[in-house]
Image (spheres, coloured by chain):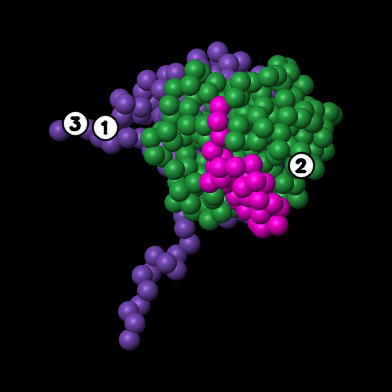
Chain colours: A green, B purple
């Protein structure tokens, strides 16, 4: 499956889930597939998307949180899987678009092109629900599992690289404020909730 | 017959030092109920005090400082006021998240840094990063205060948190080794 098509399929099935996208192609494709206030697009901090999602899921236990990560990004922050396995936010799903390359930076091979199995690493870290999917149907089925079974879930989606067709707004503060307003966590008066 | 248990198990743990009690009290008084941390020895006293006195504060241990900041960013987006505890050596690990996530998105956090490499340091390997802490924070526009005495710890933490969560910026309190750490053995008289 191609990453943009898979992202479109995933977004079409969303309701009020918060979605955190890793910088570069995962964020571009999320924006192209369907911009929505509940999307949080990162423009930097490569590797940190799964950690942002973990904190968000811990803070908002009543809302499903989906992270759209990349194989190269997650490889930068494998410790995040151990922390997520320890904290066990049941409302967290990490989708890893595994195209076996650093797609945003010119297509250099990642370790997953040479045998590294991110779902096995997630299971080894202690996340029991960690699967690899290779088709849009398998992805849809794995997403359906996340809606009925407590997480955390890791879904490694083997995708083909595809050229980005759009980019989200560059105003980071706008993106943050829109996201927090959609979640009901914006604190326009200063201080904000504890 | 079972042997008598070690007497140490029946003795209360020694009270945390006054500076650590002040830091913990300040975090609580500032309304932060989330601590994300990578531990070091001085910070263990803060964490022990939090566990004992402030059970309404959730503590989350991270594998690396940048990850701790990522979790803290998510907590803030979810409506919480995060505090990050780290040793200064880990600030270097965090600079990408600070400079490309927290600063441009104006995401606040109370940052409490246990210093290495400053006065009372004995390990040269810790000195270069220690010297880099203030210039790095200055370059990122992150205000920082240094707590010099235990009596001022709580008040300084609360004031720093007010800056962080009121102005929605990162703000840091530095805990120098002369505050947190007994004098090193190198100061024993030479033989």
In terms of secondary structure, where does tag 3 sit? loop
In terms of secondary structure, where does tag 1 sit? helix
State how many labels appear.
3
**Nearer to us: label 1 or label 2:** 2
Q: Taking A32 as reference, is B91 left or right?
A: left
Mark 1 — residue?
Answer: B186
The residue lying at 46 percent from left, 55 percent from top is B14
- What number is the disc on residue A61? none
Could you tell me which chain the residue with mark 1 belongs to?
B
Observer-nearest of A19 and A11: A11
In terms of secondary structure, where does tag 2 sit? loop
- What number is the disc on residue B190? 3
For the record, the magenta segment spans A132-161
- Image position, residue B23 (x, y; %): 58, 39
- Residues at marks 3 and 1, common chain? yes
**Nearer to us: label 2 or label 3:** 2
- What number is the disc on residue A14? 2
User: Residue A25 lies in what quarter of the image?
Assistant: top right
Observer-nearest of A73 and A110: A110
Mark 3 surroundings within 10 Å by alpha-carbon count, few (fewer than 14), some (14 through 19), many (20 or more): few
Mark 2 surroundings within 10 Å by alpha-carbon count, few (fewer than 14), some (14 through 19), many (20 or more): few
Q: Taking B131 as reference, is A71 left or right?
A: right
- Residues at marks 2 and 3, common chain? no
The residue lying at 35 percent from left, 35 percent from top is B183
Compute the Cα span from label 3 to label 1: 8 Å
Mark 1 surroundings within 10 Å by alpha-carbon count, few (fewer than 14), some (14 through 19), many (20 or more): few
**Nearer to us: label 3 or label 1:** 1
Observer-nearest of B119 and B52: B52
Residue at the far right in the pictured view: A189
* Residue A135 in magenta stretch: yes
Compute the Cα span from label 2 to label 3: 70 Å
């Amino acid at each position: 499956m191609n990453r943009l098509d898979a992202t479109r399929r995933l977004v079409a099935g969303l309701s009020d889930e918060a979605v955190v996208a890793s910088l570069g192609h995962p964020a571009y494709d999320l924006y192209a597939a369907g911009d929505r206030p509940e999307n949080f697009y990162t423009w930097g901090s490569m590797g940190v998307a799964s950690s942002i999602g973990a904190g968000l899921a811990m803070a908002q236990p009543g809302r499903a949180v989906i992270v759209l990560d990349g194989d190269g990004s997650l490889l930068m922050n494998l410790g995040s899987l151990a922390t997520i396995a320890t904290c066990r936010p049941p409302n967290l799903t990490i989708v890893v678009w595994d195209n076996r390359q650093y797609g945003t930076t010119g297509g250099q091979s990642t370790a997953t092109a040479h045998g590294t199995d991110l779902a096995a690493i997630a299971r080894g870290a202690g996340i029991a629900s960690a699967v690899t999917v290779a088709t849009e149907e398998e992805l849809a089925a794995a997403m359906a599992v996340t809606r009925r079974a407590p997480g955390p879930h890791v879904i490694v989606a083997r995708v083909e690289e595809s050229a980005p067709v759009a980019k989200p707004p560059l105003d980071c503060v706008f993106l943050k404020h829109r996201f927090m307003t959609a979640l009901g966590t914006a604190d326009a008066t200063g201080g904000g909730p504890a | 017959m079972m042997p008598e248990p070690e007497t140490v198990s029946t003795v209360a743990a020694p009270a945390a030092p006054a500076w650590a009690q002040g830091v913990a009290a300040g975090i609580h008084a500032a309304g932060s109920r989330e601590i994300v941390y990578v531990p070091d020895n001085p910070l263990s006293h803060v964490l022990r005090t939090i566990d004992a006195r402030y059970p309404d504060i959730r503590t989350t241990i991270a594998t690396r400082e940048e990850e701790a900041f990522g979790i803290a960013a998510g907590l803030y987006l979810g409506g919480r006021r995060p505090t990050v505890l780290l040793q200064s050596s880990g600030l270097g690990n965090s600079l990408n998240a600070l400079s490309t996530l927290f600063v441009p998105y104006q995401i606040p956090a109370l940052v409490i840094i246990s210093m290495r490499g400053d006065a009372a340091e004995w390990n040269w390997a810790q000195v270069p990063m220690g010297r880099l802490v203030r210039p790095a924070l200055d370059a990122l526009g992150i205000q920082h205060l240094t707590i010099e005495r235990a009596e001022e710890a709580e008040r300084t933490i609360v004031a720093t948190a007010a800056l962080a969560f009121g102005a929605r910026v990162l703000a840091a309190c530095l805990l120098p080794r002369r505050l947190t750490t007994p004098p090193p053995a190198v100061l024993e008289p030479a033989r």
